[in-house]
Image (spheres, grey):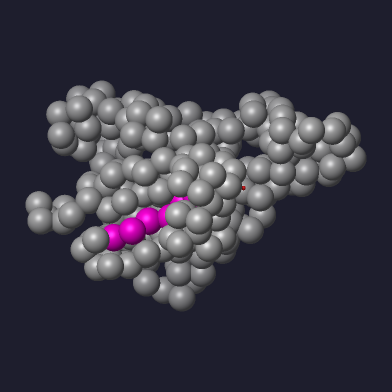
Amino acid sequence: MAAHVKPLILHAHSSSPNPIKVAITLEALHIPYEVKKWDFGDDPEKGVKGTKFLKINENGRVPAIEDPNTGVVAWESGACMNYIRRVYDKGNMIGPSGELAQDLVDFEKWEYFLLTTLGPMTGQAIWFRKYNAEKNENALERYTAQTYRCYDVLEGQLKKTGAESILNGRVSAVDYHFEPWLHNYPLAGLSLDKYPLIKKWLGLMETREEEALHGLKLGLCIATGKVATPAANVRVEHAVSREHIISKLS
Ligand SMILES: N[C@@H](CCC(=O)N[C@@H](CS)C(=O)NCC(=O)O)C(=O)O
């Protein structure tokens, strides 16, 4: 990333998966960024539903990004990540792996599946398990079943790719979309016992993060001696550190 790039501002909340996806994308592309944290609620100065934040995102949710290099303001994690890719991923490190119409559709269909289905179903499962003031077993059952249905679909896809990445061939922004949501399965009270390939993929993503922590500490993001194959090197180049990201968000 060119040295003259001014840090982007990532508007976030420390424990939420959607801002983490954007942070992973920024880290993967080595784009400098600063995190501005917001509370949930309507505090006029600090809350996502407060007057100050609503001027940035009238939908009152994180993430949002501001790019001082272009003046662009974006919200919705998908729009933020696609903006970042269009402007900063000129070498197409994390986008669709080919230029065929099918390659682009494959990328988008998994991206949209996460944004419209797996993410919201998991979010509701977490809500009804942990946060809803009154018990609502019916809603909890419904969202738990729907999230497992999404896991079935993802497990089937990982069977086709060997579970190294969601799309064939390489880790992409699609994996960055899914990882923070799958990482939250215990919070939603779910189990991966019936999903060996999701477990494998999640484990690989987490290994990449650990590897990258080493690289990031050195100011580099290169494969370490522990990684042997060229395919793994590609993974590590895209790797990011959960600890590093969480430390920025907290
Ligand atoms: N579809 C949105 C969802 C954003 C979203 O729900 N963000 C949550 C945190 S993960 C939020 O800001 N919640 C605050 C609230 O509901 O008041 C996206 O992908 O960015």
Q: Is the residue 92 above or below the residue 210 in the image?
A: below
Q: Is residue 179 left or right of residue 195?
A: left
Which residue is painted at 16% across and 36% down in the image? 220
Quarter of the image for the C terminus: give it: top left
Q: Is residue 127 left or right of residue 101?
A: right
Where residue 33 appears, as percent x and y from the top left, is: 27, 47
Q: Quadrant of residue 195?
A: top right
Where residue 186 appears, as percent x and y from the top left, is: 64, 27
Figure label count: 0
Which residue is painted at 33% across and 58% down in the image? 66
Q: Quadrant of residue 20?
A: top left
Where residue 42 appears, as percent x and y from the top left, is: 58, 47
Instruction: Looking at the picture, tell me which residue is in the foreground, 233 or 186.
Output: 186
Q: Is residue 18 visible?
A: no
Task: Determine the residue located farthest toward the left in the rendered image.
Answer: 3
Q: Is the residue 205 above or below the residue 80 in the image?
A: above
Q: Quadrant of residue 6?
A: bottom left
Q: Does 85 appear in magenta?
A: no
Task: Determine the residue located farthest toward the bottom in the rendered image.
Answer: 101
Q: Which residues are magenta?
A: 62-67
Q: Is the residue 181 above or below the residue 89 in the image?
A: above
Task: Determine the residue located farthest toward the right in the rendered image.
Answer: 138
Where residue 15 appears, as percent x and y from the top left, is: 51, 34
Q: Is residue 30 visible?
A: yes
Which residue is painted at 86% across and 32% down in the image? 135
Which residue is painted at 56% across and 51% down in the image? 49
Q: Magenta segment, principal secondary structure?
A: strand
